[in-house]
Amino acid sequence: MAKYKLVLLRHGEGAWNKENRFCSWVDQKLNSDGEQEARNCGKQLKALRFEFDLVFTSVLNRSIHTAWLILEELGQEWVPLESSWRLNERHYGALIGLNREKMALNHGEEQVRIWRRSYNVTPPPIDESHPYYHEIYNDRRYKVCDVPVDQLPRAESLKEVLDRLLPYWTERIAPELRSGKTILISAHGNSSRALLKHLEGISDDDIINITLPTGIPILLELDENLHAVGPHQFLGDQEAIQAAIRKVDDQGKVKKAGK
Amino acid sequence: MAPWDPLIPSDGPSHLYAQTQIILPHCPRPRGPQTLAQAKGVPGQEAQPGTYFGQIRHWSRLSRVILRLAPFCQPWAPPSRKATDHLPLSLSLPQAQNASWQLVKGGGVESEHHKARNTWPTDCAPLHFRAVSTAYVPSALPATAIAMPTHRLVIVRHGESTWNQENRFCGWFDAELSEKGKEEAKRGAQAIKEAGLEFDICYTSVLKRAIRTLWFILDGIDQMWVPVVRTWRLNERHYGGLTGLNKAETAAKHGEAQVKIWRRSFDIPPPPMDETHPYYSVISKERRYAGLKPGELPTCESLKDTIARALPFWNEQIAPQIKSGKRVLIAAHGNSLRGIVKHLEGMSDEAIMELNLPTGIPIVYELDDQLKPTKPMQFLGDEETVRKAMEAVAAQGKAK
């Protein structure tokens, strides 16, 4: 019996999505397509008459900007919004900034797929020689987290994402849901997947097949124990949703000759 | 009066912050030191080209202290071109050269200058410059007599809304920012970015015109992740039964004087908004106010009422954050911000009515550890923008 409603979503496109690069903790902005995806998401939620009481985002500005655009479309800018690093995208370690296609050429599509979609394979960690290391760890937002900056991850598997996300879910988000609030979580591809895995009880093996499209709201209905009463539902036009899923999947593939 | 006489009339008000006047740069201002830090030549504090720090002056003991120290500052010398051409009359006089200059209230050569040319700034008290000779050596006051600023607060009034554009009483109606309002917010963001300011927590109302102004700023300064607290207590004044009415029509119907009273009196509320009001359901029944206790939801407010519900939030939430060292940004509305300014500066009811905070222009306060301002508020932005904004607000309410 569905008692609680949760909407989560993966933010829209940033410049690096288009360039097919692992963005992760680099603070890319949404591009104009990404902003439009966010607005469409908001319009969809408005048509379905969603009334949110609380919004959670990561500290990456593409997640926050997506939430802002959705709230604008809904006319719900006044809804309280909370940001936490624990909803950040998965940390891709030394792979940050590298192009997925080139990686697929160098390491094979299968290895790239494993890195992207497996449950407990951790990529190589980022170190100080990485071009984006200082841009990330010198940022003030990571100096005010609930862990010291030197204890923040340097690379993560999907399992490790869930390990740092779950305390936030349990201590901050779940109590709000239990108090009857309708919650929106504007997150990232992997942080959303990690959360869905936990709430829906998806196995370690099956999670590799789950793909979340960008900018499509995902509804999850939960029982009083905060377990999903059914599979997550994409809200919106089904054809558009399937096309969006295929687009994300294709990012890992090598382009065929002549395309 | 000899140049070394105290600039504050000795029969001036005895409480700390007596009166506020808005300074409009009707004449090009000399680019002399405009803050104590600039005068001392603190690196990084030099006035940037194109940046104008408009100041609200206060007749206060502290100002007197700072003014007395002014002669120790680098004397202002006019640029080598024939710079006196553009100066107001009082500053082109020989004795004004190589002297520090102070802004004083009332009278003076420049008053005559303005009167002759009919170039008075509207709604503002007369102002003029007077040169103080650098020959004056005051008895030195110990540095510890000056309260050093320990906290910085930035407040900003949202930009033009679509209803401001239509000159309608807006109040608690959740109007959108107009295109001009969005531009004002972006300019405000740019001014804060150029000043290099960082924030730890932001406060705003539950009305989208303030929230979106804050969003423009946070986006512009790349601090979108900073926590934001929204509260109805920072909302605009509730204009009750006048909400939605066009100001010009109301002025024509009730007379400019009555409109001015409703808008500008301290404790006379407008008529209340009741269930028959066309905007009742989108305001009073709105979900965002569902958590208010009985008796908290207003049906109309005077400025006194607005301040009475804003100040508890300042005292209980914002002030402790500032005192704990957090750098705070507040994006709100003309009247809720007036409440904060009145409280910070100990202004009288009459004085606050004369204060028009400009829209979209960040206002910086430096506060001591008792949260008293240590210097006049500073506007961030270019001179032209500041001046135009002040004139625009003063023109509202007059029948077209």
Image (tube, coloured by chain):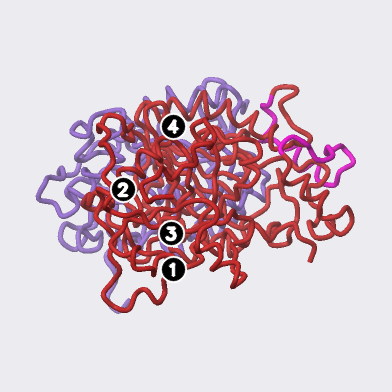
* 3D distance between C-alphas at marks 4 and 3: 24 Å
* 3D distance between C-alphas at marks 1 and 2: 21 Å
Q: Quarter of the image containing the C terminus of chain A?
A: bottom left
- Give the quarter of the image for residue B62: top left
| Callout in the foreground (1, 2) | 2
Q: Secondary structure at mark 1?
A: loop
Of A251 and B141, nearer the camera is B141
**Relative image position of residue B331 (x, y in whole percent):** 52, 45
Residue found at the far front of this picture = B2
Q: Are marks 4 and 2 on the same chain?
A: yes
At 27% across and 56% down in the image, what residue appears? B46
Q: Image height check: is B316 above or below B239? A: above
Q: Which residue is mark 2?
A: B70
Q: Earlier in the sequence, mark 4 or mark 3?
A: 4
| Callout in the foreground (3, 2) | 2
In the rendered structure, which amino acid carries the disc numbered 3?
Answer: Gly
Q: Secondary structure at mark 4?
A: loop
Q: Are marks 1 and 2 in contact (CB under 8 Å)?
A: no
Q: Earlier in the sequence, mark 1 or mark 2?
A: 1
In the rendered structure, which amino acid carries the disc numbered 2?
Answer: Ala
Q: Is residue B282 magenta?
A: yes
Q: Are marks 1 and 2 on the same chain?
A: yes
Of all chains, the one bearing label 4 is: B
**Relative image position of residue B134 (x, y in whole percent):** 28, 53
The disc placed on residue B372 is: 4
State which region is magenta: B266-292
Q: Which residue is mark 1?
A: B28
